[in-house]
Image (cartoon, rainbow, N blue to C red):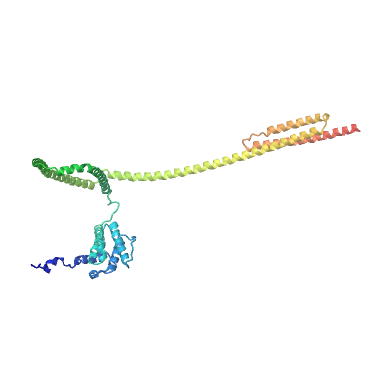
C-alpha cells in the first residue's frame, strides 16, 4: 500500500496569520501638524497612537465636533463599554449629517493608527477651510471695499445667471421626471432592441452616415476657425484705429483746456455784478418781509380796538334798555295804585294829570330810544332827557297828591 504524502508546511504559508498593517508615518505627521495649526489645546505626539488610546481619540473627536458646531449635544461619558459605543455612534452620525464626512465606527473604536486615519478626514475639512479663509484674507488685505468701488452690475449679472440656472434646473428636473415615468413602457422596447441580432450591412451604413456627418461638422469647424483668424485681424485693426482717434481727441481736449476763452473776462464781470444784485435783492426782500409783518401787526391791533369798542357800545345799549324797562315798570305800578285808591268822580282831574304824565313819559321814551348813537354825546343827551322826564313825573305826582288831600277834606265835611 502506498502511503499518502503529507503536504509540506511551506505550501500553506499563505494561510498563516499576517501582521496587521499600521498607519503610515506621513499620515500621523500630517494629523499632528493639522491639529497644531487648528490650535488644539494640547500637544499630540506621533507616539500616542502606537498603542490603543481611546481617551485621547475621544477627546480629539469631541474637540472636532465642537469646532464644527459649538452648540452640539453628544454623550461625553466614555467610562464603560456601552458609553463608548454610544459616543462613537453619536459622533459618526453627527459627522455624517453636519460635516458630510463618513467615518468608520469600528476603526474609531480601535483607537489606534486606523482611528487616526478616520480622524484625519474631519481634520482635513477644517484645515482646508482655514487655508481658504487665510488665502482670501491675504488677497483682500490691501483692498478696502467702499461704495465707489462696489459695482452692482456684476451682482446683477450674477443674479440673472442664477435665475437662469434655477429655471434650467427646474425644466431639466421636470423632463427627467417624465422620462423616468416612461421607463416602464420603454424598458421592454430597450430589452428587445438589445436582444435583437444586428445586421452587419445596416451597421456599416449607419457608421458611414455618422462618419460623414462628423467629417462635415469638422469641416465646418475648420472654416469657422479660419474665419475667426480673419475676424481677429479685422478687430485688431479697428482697435488700433480707435486708439489713434482717442489719442487725437485727448490732445485736442488738452489744447482746449489750456486756451482761455475770449468771453471769459466778460463772464467773470457779469458774475460779480450778478452777485451784487443778488445781495441787493436779498436786502430788499428782507425789508419787505419786515414791513409786511409790521403792517399785519397794525391791522391786528386796529381790529382788536374796534372789537373792544363794539363790545363797550353793546354793553351800554343793554344797560340803557334795562333802565328803560325799570322806569316803565315803575310808572305802570304807580298808575295802578292811584286807580284802586280814589273814587271814580275824583279821578277825572287825576286822569288829566296821569295823561299828562304819560305824555311826558312817552316823550322821555322817544328821547331815550333803543338805537345806539354814533358817539357818546347822543347817549348823554338821551340820558339827560330821561332825567328831565323823571323830574316832571315827580312834580305831577306831588300835584296829584295835593288834590287828593283836598277832595278828601270835602268828603269828610259832607259825611259830618
In the rendered image, the vertical position of residue 68 relative to residue 239, given as above or below: below
User: Image quarter for residue 85?
Assistant: bottom left
Residue depicted at 71% across the width and 31% down the height: 362
- 329 relative position to 255: left or right: right
Quadrant of image for the C terminus: top right
View extreme (right): residue: 416
Look at the image and tell me in which quarter the N terminus lies.
bottom left
- Specify the farthest residue to the front: 1
Depth check, front residue: 75 or 242: 75
Q: Position of residue 272 (x, y in %)?
A: 33, 46
* Residue 184 visible here: yes
Q: Residue visible at 18% across and 43% down?
A: 190
Task: Give the total number of marks visible in the rendering.
Answer: 0
Asked whether, in this view, residue 214 is left or right of residue 411, the answer is left
Quarter of the image for residue 380 reads top right
- The percent coordinates of residue 89 (x first, y second) are 29, 61
Q: Nearer the viewer, residue 136 or 215?
A: 215
Image height of 386 relative to 282, above or below: above
Q: Is residue 388 visible?
A: no
Q: Position of residue 78 (x, y in %)?
A: 32, 66
User: Does residue 93 appear left or right of residue 398 in this picture?
Assistant: left
Of 8 and 1, nearer the camera is 1
Residue 358 screen position, x and y as percent = 74, 31
- Comparing 14 with 329, the one in front is 14
Q: Quadrant of residue 57?
A: bottom left
Amino acid at each position: 500500500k502506498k502511503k499518502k504524502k503529507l503536504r509540506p508546511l511551506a505550501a500553506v504559508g499563505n494561510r498563516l496569520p499576517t501582521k496587521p498593517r499600521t498607519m503610515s508615518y506621513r499620515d500621523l505627521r500630517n494629523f499632528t501638524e493639522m491639529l497644531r495649526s487648528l490650535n488644539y489645546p494640547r500637544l499630540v505626539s506621533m507616539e500616542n497612537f502606537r498603542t490603543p488610546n481611546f481617551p485621547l481619540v475621544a477627546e480629539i473627536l469631541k474637540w472636532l465636533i465642537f469646532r464644527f458646531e459649538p452648540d452640539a449635544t453628544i454623550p461625553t461619558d466614555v467610562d464603560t463599554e456601552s458609553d463608548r459605543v454610544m459616543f462613537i455612534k453619536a459622533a459618526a452620525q453627527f459627522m455624517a449629517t453636519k460635516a458630510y464626512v463618513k467615518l468608520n465606527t469600528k476603526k474609531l473604536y480601535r483607537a489606534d493608527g486606523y482611528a487616526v486615519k478616520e480622524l484625519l478626514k474631519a481634520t482635513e475639512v477644517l484645515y482646508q477651510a482655514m487655508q481658504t479663509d487665510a488665502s482670501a484674507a491675504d488677497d483682500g488685505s490691501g483692498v478696502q471695499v467702499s461704495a465707489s468701488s462696489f459695482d452692482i452690475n456684476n451682482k446683477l449679472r450674477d443674479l440673472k445667471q442664477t435665475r437662469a440656472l434655477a429655471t434650467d434646473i427646474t425644466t431639466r428636473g421636470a423632463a427627467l421626471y417624465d422620462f423616468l415615468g416612461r421607463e416602464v413602457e420603454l424598458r421592454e422596447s430597450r430589452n428587445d432592441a438589445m436582444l435583437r441580432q444586428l445586421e452587419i450591412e445596416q451597421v456599416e451604413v449607419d457608421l458611414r452616415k455618422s462618419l460623414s456627418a462628423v467629417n462635415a461638422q469638422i469641416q465646418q469647424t475648420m472654416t469657422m476657425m479660419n474665419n475667426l483668424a480673419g475676424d481677429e485681424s479685422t478687430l485688431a485693426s479697428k482697435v488700433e484705429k480707435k486708439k489713434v482717434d482717442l489719442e487725437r481727441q485727448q490732445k485736442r481736449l488738452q489744447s482746449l483746456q489750456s486756451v482761455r476763452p475770449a468771453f471769459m473776462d466778460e463772464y467773470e464781470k457779469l458774475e460779480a455784478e450778478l452777485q451784487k444784485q443778488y445781495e441787493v435783492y436779498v436786502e430788499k426782500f428782507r425789508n419787505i418781509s419786515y414791513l409786511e409783518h409790521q403792517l399785519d401787526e397794525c391791522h391786528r391791533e386796529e381790529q382788536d380796538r374796534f372789537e373792544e369798542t363794539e363790545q363797550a357800545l353793546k354793553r351800554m345799549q343793554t344797560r340803557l334798555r334795562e333802565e328803560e324797562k325799570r322806569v316803565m315798570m315803575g310808572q305802570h305800578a304807580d298808575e295802578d295804585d292811584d286807580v284802586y285808591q280814589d273814587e271814580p268822580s275824583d279821578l277825572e282831574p287825576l286822569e288829566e294829570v296821569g295823561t299828562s304824565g304819560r305824555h311826558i313819559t312817552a316823550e322821555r321814551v322817544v328821547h331815550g330810544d333803543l338805537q345806539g348813537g354814533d358817539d357818546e354825546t347822543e347817549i348823554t343827551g338821551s340820558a339827560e332827557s330821561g332825567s328831565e322826564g323823571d323830574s316832571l313825573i315827580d312834580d305831577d305826582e306831588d300835584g296829584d297828591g295835593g288834590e287828593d288831600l283836598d277832595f278828601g277834606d270835602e268828603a269828610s265835611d259832607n259825611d259830618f
